[in-house]
Amino acid sequence: MRKRVGLAVAALMLVTAALSGCSSGGGTSMASDLPKPERDPSVDMSRLSSELNVFTWTEYLPQSVISEFEDLYGVRVNYDAYSSNEEMHAKLKAGASGYDIIIPEIYMVKVLRREGLLEEIDHANVPNLKNIDPRFRGLEHDPNNDYSVPYVWGTTGIVVNKERISPDQIQSWDDLWNPDFAGKLVVPDDAREMVGIALRTMGHGLNTTDPAALEAAKEKLKALKPNVRAFNSDSPKDLLLGGEVWGGVVWSGEAALVMRESEDFQWIIPPEGVTIWIDHVAIPKDAPHKYTAEVFINFLLDPLVSARISAEYPYGNPNKAAMPYIPAEDLANTAINPPAEWLKKAESLDDLGDEMNQLYDQIWTEVKG
């Protein structure tokens, strides 16, 4: 168990350093004001396929970015969505073919590499990899970025409607169990995140494998269920802004979008610690359009494209070259770039192996059922 701390601390140090590096500069332009990217003259247009099949999270690739790629390169982008890393993994492992692009989290990159489910990326076709801040390259899961390229990073915390829930009422993860919140919370439909939260309330780490601790976490989550109105990983902001829920557990970028829409909401990182993650773009094994996928990855790393992604889905951005195009108010938003002291107990998810991953999924299925 202790050996996994190294990965968490490494990720924490990386992001903490990145925060200080990104805190200065930044423009005030919005996505609509950004210049359009240009076609890369080094792309061999004769090698491009007529279509590209993307499999990733809901609301993770702006339609404007997809349309620009289609217009520049004459490639139709087909977009399928999943709601968790585990859902994506299960589909690929079952032999789902035809996908060219996925965006897994670090621990899932490790799983997919271990199982031989990723293609090696030809760096010659991704020259914009140089735009990634060096602090986000060469990480333990993929030291040479042979199989994955950083896309966005963030945390998983709590957002509350201050008109409904006083921030003083939620000072820790344990406060989510307050019976006053019956039927008023939204949480992600994600086994690792939610079991991890229950583990933290009992003093355990995010990557715990002890069966007794996991059984206790399951019972604790069952006790939380009366407070949960919805299990939603796709678009909890709609429930929050619509007043259907008063708060909940969300990804940081989703919280930032809610906070843009309404000043009634506040972002909270509990002192017990949160999940910190970096999602990466990767190419599944036997992708039918590998060259086109590499051209697409390079397109995503264009500074203007990367800044447009941040403008629409405001997660942390590891693209150093994009920083001048990101509004200063976004760089200062604590949901997007939390202060370093908030992250002292942050952990990153690790690959726990097939047997343990299945146990987490089983626990979550029983909790929801």
Image (cartoon, rainbow, N blue to C red):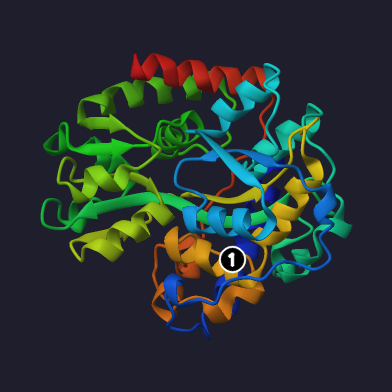
The residue located at (58%, 65%) in the rendering is 306
The location of residue 133, given as percent across then percent down, is: 70, 70
In the displayed structure image, the side of residue 161 where residue 102 appears, left or right:
right
The location of residue 223, given as percent across then percent down, is: 27, 24
The residue located at (78%, 48%) in the rendering is 48
The residue located at (65%, 60%) in the rendering is 72
**What is the quadrant of residue 147 in the picture?**
top right
Q: Is residue 24 visible?
A: yes
Return the residue nearer the eye: 247 or 350: 247
The location of residue 30, given as percent across then percent down, is: 42, 75
Which amino acid is tagged 1? Answer: Val
Which residue is the site of mark 1? 305
* Residue 236 in the image: above or below residue 231: below
Quadrant where the C terminus sits is: top left
Quadrant where the N terminus sits is: top right
* Residue 37 in the image: above or below residue 104: below
The residue located at (40%, 39%) in the rendering is 234
The location of residue 367, given as percent across then percent down, is: 36, 19
* Residue 307 in the image: above or below residue 365: below
